[in-house]
Image: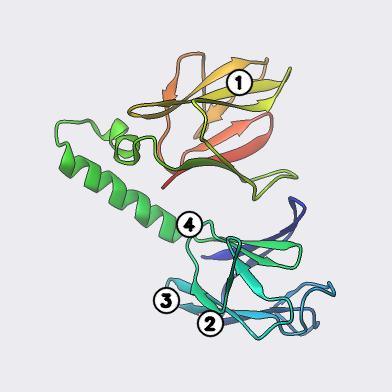
Amino acid sequence: MPKMIVSIDGVVIKEVQLTKDRTSLGRRPYNDIVIDNLAVSGEHAVLQMSGNEVFVEDLNSTNGTYLNGKAVKKQQLNNGDTVEIGKYKIKYVNEVASAGFEKTMIIKAGSVAPAASAAPAAPAEGGTGNAAIKVMSGAAAGREVALVKVVTTIGKPGVAVAAITKRPQGFVVAHVEGDSKPTLNGAPIGVEPVSLKNGDVLELAGTQMQFVQR
């Protein structure tokens, strides 16, 4: 079921499941998602759901509605998109759509290279293109860190640190330091690099993160 995660300054303040065809956002108390801030209009925007598709529409608000940093009037949302209203960020999460996209990637990779095993097929399809780590829990939930460097370290020094390395065939993760071992989809990660695929969930020092490859 699609949902909206509302945050300000990286701190999540509420999560709203989209169960209706029309979900309103605004400052007035009768809205489905109430954002009590003067930068937000009384009736600011509306989320319209049609099947598995969700659209955001600005209701001629004073300060406008932004999607991934760009002002929009009406736009379809994709999994991971961020709607910005004033200082508030509202992240759209639709795991059904994301899972379908991931399955398509794996099938496509297999058809291009039938000799390849299923495990490396997904990262090979994306190569080392656009990838990011999305924080799913804790104070920084909703934040996304783009994996643009050859090596990106994540975690808390002295507690648990892991390194994500960009390789020609995809991305790998390995445990670097700390007594607490990170886990990948619930399995502990050692010092030997483990391949990452789209949708994998990392847990490090009590924080859950998801590897996203586009």
Mark pair 1, 4: CA separation: 27 Å
Type of the residue with mark 1: Lys
Q: Which residue is mark 2?
A: 21
Q: Secondary structure at mark 4?
A: helix
Three-letter amino acid code at the position of disc 4: Glu
Q: Secondary structure at mark 1?
A: loop
**Residue 205 at x, y percent in the picture:** 68, 29
Q: Residue at x 17, y 41 (%)?
A: 112
Q: Amino acid at mark 2?
A: Asp
State yes or no: discs 4 and 3 in contact (Cβ < 8 Å).
no
Q: Which of marks 1 and 2 precedes in the sequence?
A: 2
Give me the disc on residue 65: none
Task: Look at mark 1 in the image and give the residue it sits on.
Answer: 181
Identify which residue is drawn at 66% across, 65% down: 84
The disc labelled 3 sits on which kind of residue?
Gly
Q: Residues within 10 Å of mark 4 (few under 14, many from 20)?
A: some
Question: Height in image: 203 above or below 98?
Answer: above
Could you tell which of marks 3 and 2 lies nearer the N-terminus? 2
- Between 109 and 146, the one lying in front of the other is 146
Residue lying at 42% horizontally and 60% vertically, measured from the top left: 97
> In the rendered view, would you say 213 is above or below 62?
above
Q: Nearer the viewer, residue 87 or 188?
A: 87
Q: Residues within 10 Å of mark 3 (few under 14, many from 20)?
A: few
**160 sits to left or right of 169:** right
Q: Position of residue 10 (x, y in %)?
A: 74, 50
Which residue lies under the disc numbered 4?
Answer: 95
Q: Which mark is residue 51?
A: 3
